[in-house]
Amino acid sequence: MLTLSTLWYNIFMEKKTYHHGNLKEALISAGLEILTEKGIEGLSLRNVARKVGVSHTAPYNHFSDKQGLLAVISTTGFAQLHQILLDTFEKSMDNPPNILLEIAWAYLQFALDNPAKFKLMFSGALEEERNHPAYMEISGKSIALFEEIISFCQSKGQLPAGRVDSLATKLWSSVHGFTTLMLENQFPPQYLQENDIKELLRAVVTC
């Protein structure tokens, strides 16, 4: 239980050590840095507070617990990825043969540019997802977008007729697997030396 003297001390320390304009964003950035350096196991609200330079109780003004922080980071990541894929889709609609390749390439680039965030998004570390409405909303929008892309490609003859969810499962599994292997540097060197990466990815999305 916090005493009055402890509370005033915490406020004093936060004013003394914290000079940024947005504490919540600073905490999120610190969380991403810790994820990059130490992985999910090293992430805690106490460690995030220490990295930012505020009292260990300060993060609780924005996150109920570690799960709350994970939810915000994951939600932000999915929102960024959704926007990137939506922009890519809209730019590629006039060139149907390349839509799937460009979508897959954008997915790969997002992962390579944001490795810690991407790994968290698909780690399963976020428990009780339904307790985080913003996360559930963006997850639903992302699935709907992917299905829209597949339906569009079917209408243009770039994908075979059939159940959209079945094609979504096949394509996402293939692209995500490729992305994960790239992210973890698990491809044999000769595969990458002898081939253009984007052309390798084209083969992955060709049905």
Image (tube, rainbow, N blue to C red):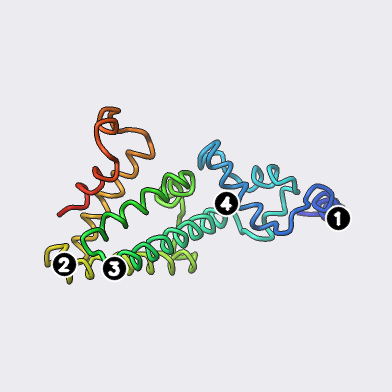
Q: Indicate the quadrant containing the C terminus: top left, top right, bottom left or bottom right.
A: bottom left
Q: Secondary structure at mark 2?
A: loop
Left or right placement of residue 161 versus residue 67 in this view? left
3 and 4 marks in contact (CB < 8 Å)? no
Residue to which mark 1 is pinned? 8
Q: Position of residue 156 (x, y in %)?
A: 17, 69
Say whether disc 4 or disc 1 marks the residue closer to the N-terminus. Answer: 1
Within 10 Å of disc 2 (Cα), the crowding (few <14, some 14-19, many 20+) is: few
| Point 37% across, 68% down: residue | 140
**Alpha-carbon span between mark 3 and mark 2:** 21 Å
Q: Residue at x 87, y 53 (%)?
A: 5
**Amino acid type at image mark 2:** Arg
Q: Earlier in the sequence, mark 1 or mark 3?
A: 1
Residue 152, percent from left and from top: 23, 70
Residue that carries the numbered disc 2 in the rendered image: 163
Asked which secondary structure carries label 4, the reply is helix
Tell me if label 4 and label 1 are in contact, CB under 8 Å. no
Q: Earlier in the sequence, mark 2 or mark 1?
A: 1
Residue at the spot 17% in from the left edge and 68% down from the top edge? 154
Q: CA distance from mark 2 to mark 1?
A: 60 Å
Residue toward you, 91 or 186: 91
Question: What is the C-alpha distance between the residues marked 4 and 1?
Answer: 24 Å
Q: Which mark is residue 93?
A: 3
- Residue type for callout 3: Met
The mark lying in front, picked from 3 and 2, is 3
Residue behind mark 4: 66
How far apart marks 3 and 4 lie (CA) works out to 40 Å
Q: 10 Å neighbourhood of mark 1: few (<14), some, or many (≥20)?
A: few
Residue 102 image offset from top left, x and y in percent: 31, 56
Task: Judge the density around disc 4: few (<14), some (14-19), many (≥20) Cα neighbours within 10 Å.
Answer: some
